[in-house]
Image (cartoon, rainbow, N blue to C red):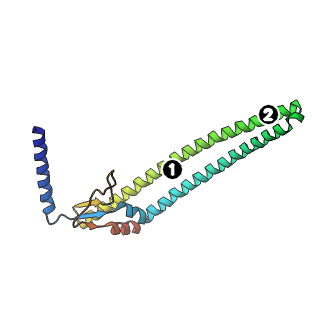
Amino acid sequence: MDMFMKVSVFAVLAMSFLTTVLAAEDFRIAKFDVRKIFSDWNYSIESQKKIEDMRAELEEENNARLAAINNLQMQRTKMHQQYQKDAASMTKEQKVKMDTAFRSLGRDALALEQDRRDFFAKGRRHLAGEITSEANLILDRITQEAQVYALEKKFAMVVESGGETTSNTPFFLHLDGAVDITAELIKRLNAKKE
């Protein structure tokens, strides 16, 4: 019961303080939607295109490697069919030569498949790193611009209004009197030379 009382007193004090601060006339709140900035800021758009181009290059190279592997496997299949068709009329030397070529194609296909898997895994790790790096850079620049704008316009608080909780509900359902600065931030970010 003692712990409950302490928590209750703390909650009442916190609410009193917050009410007092919010009642102040000069307490101005701004809000912005980071997802809207991501979709409308030229640098972010170019960054997304660059990432998509990298992803497409990786897929294209992976598909080319798969085609080469499939070609070797088709050669093996044809060789096996030829062997079954001509085995009765082949000499021992011809059988050994064909068997050696068949095994060699199998080893080559296996080595190329392992190389392709390694290449693709490394490419995906690199791509994930690029995505993380670009996202962090973009978020840092948005945050920095929001901070500068808030100081210039004397906002006491700036809230990112596009965020959601883990249950997909907005963090802030209603921000009475909050000025939406999303469009202004996009304008300022787009005006800067990259």
Residue that numbered label 2 is attached to: 99
Whether residue 194 is visible, yes or no, is: no
Q: Is residue 105 left or right of residue 116?
A: right
Q: Would you place residue 92 above or below residue 186 in this image?
A: above
Locate residue 164, reporting x and y percent. Answer: 33, 55
Whether residue 10 is visible, yes or no, is: yes
Q: Nearer the viewer, residue 45 or 105?
A: 105
Residue that numbered label 1 is attached to: 127
Q: CA distance from mark 1 to mark 2?
A: 42 Å
Task: Report the residue that reaches farthest toward the top.
Answer: 92
Describe the element under mark 1 as helix, strand or loop.
Answer: helix
Q: Residue at x 44, y 65 (%)?
A: 42
Type of amino acid under label 1:
Leu
Q: Nearer the viewer, residue 70 or 42?
A: 70
Type of amino acid under label 2:
Asp
Q: Residue at x 69, y 47 (%)?
A: 68
Q: Name the quadrant of the C terminus.
A: bottom left
Locate residue 114, reporting x and y percent. Answer: 62, 39
Q: Residue at x 87, y 34 (%)?
A: 88
Count of marks, rendered view = 2
Q: Is residue 11 left or right of residue 79?
A: left
Q: Name the quadrant of the N terminus.
A: top left
Pointer 1 with pointer 2, Cβ within 8 A: no
Q: Nearer the viewer, residue 18 or 139?
A: 18
Please tell me which of labels 1 and 2 falls first in the chain: 2
Describe the element under mark 2 as helix, strand or loop.
Answer: helix
Q: Is residue 108 left or right of residue 183?
A: right
Q: Is residue 10 left or right of residue 121?
A: left
Locate residue 31, reporting x and y percent. Answer: 28, 63
Q: Nearer the viewer, residue 80 or 171?
A: 80
Locate residue 45, reporting x and y percent. Answer: 46, 63
